[in-house]
Image: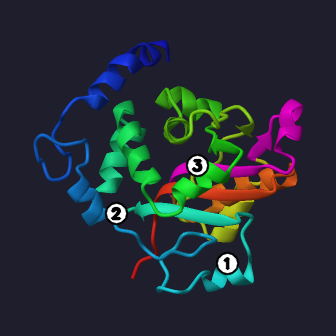
Amino acid sequence: MHSRRALRPFTSLLARLPSQCEVCRAWPAQRVCDACVARFAPPTARCGGCALPMPEGVARCGECIRHPPPLDACIAACTYAWPWPDCIAQFKFRGEAGWAGPLATLLRSAPWVEPALEQCDLVLPMPLAPGRLGERGFNQAHELARRLAPAKTDATLLLRTRDTPAQSGLARAERLRNLRGAFAVEPLRAASLHGRRVVLVDDVMTSGASLFAAAATLRLAGAAHITGVVLARTDPPR
């Protein structure tokens, strides 16, 4: 953990140097060049409750109308499809923290993210269980959040109280049951959420179960408005 902190100034310097685009190999370029962002992360009409793609002019999907989620709004920057899974894997699982800056820039450039950040009182990263945090050495959601809004980011208010079994293969209702009691608000600071507008940040949203469970915890603690902001959304198969 300490070695990773020691490397952060060096990683920050590398992030500012000219490099080759990881997608198209253009040189010199940012980690992902503007042309690839425009091509592979175009603005997409999405459901305001769960960020699934929707036809233009449709605000909410049928599921969110029938069962409103605990989020007031949900925004995704891109679809979890090539080239983003590999980019996120390098960041999340291979310890390449230098990806945080480029991916946060991609997230900030998505429509409605900037207004959400400006209007909120707090930016909270989705927390990791202690064991998972120890394995990775950093929380990727926190790295994104502190680059989106460093003055508003609070990584100690929302807690992950326990790890959960793998969610893959479970139906949405089962995922939600699996996550009951997995999140909590720091008891001595719960009052700081009363009446506040919160942005909840994560890297990848699959079914939405984790994000919804965390949002429900924040709602019970008194948050007045909650916007989920995710880098990538897993879309249903066509």
> Quick check: can you spot residue 95?
no
Q: Nearer the N terminus, badge 2 or badge 3?
A: 2
Q: Earlier in the sequence, mark 3 or mark 1?
A: 1
Q: Residue 202: image x %, image y %?
A: 55, 49
Contact between labelled residues 3 and 2, with CB atoms less than 8 Å apart: no
**Dot 2 amino acid type:** Ala
Give the distance between the C-alpha atoms of the residues marked 3 and 1, in whole angstroms.
20 Å
Left or right: residue 34 compared with residue 203? left
Q: Relative to the observer, which residue lies in front, 57 or 128?
A: 57
- Residue 125 position in % (x across, y down): 61, 42
Q: Residue at x 49, y 13 (%)?
A: 2
Q: Which residue is mark 1?
A: 64
Residue 40 falls in which quadrant of the image? bottom left
Of the two numbered discs 1 and 2 on the same chain, state the one appearing first in sequence: 2
Residue on which disc 2 sits: 41
Numbered range of the magenta stretch? 182-204
Q: Is residue 227 above or below residue 12?
A: below
Residue at 69% x, 43% y is: 122
Image location (x, y in percent) of residue 164:
65, 47
Q: Residue at x 12, y 40 (%)?
A: 28
- The residue pinned by badge 3 equals 201
Q: Is residue 45 above or below residue 146?
A: below
Contact (Cβ within 8 Å) of mark 3 with mark 1:
no
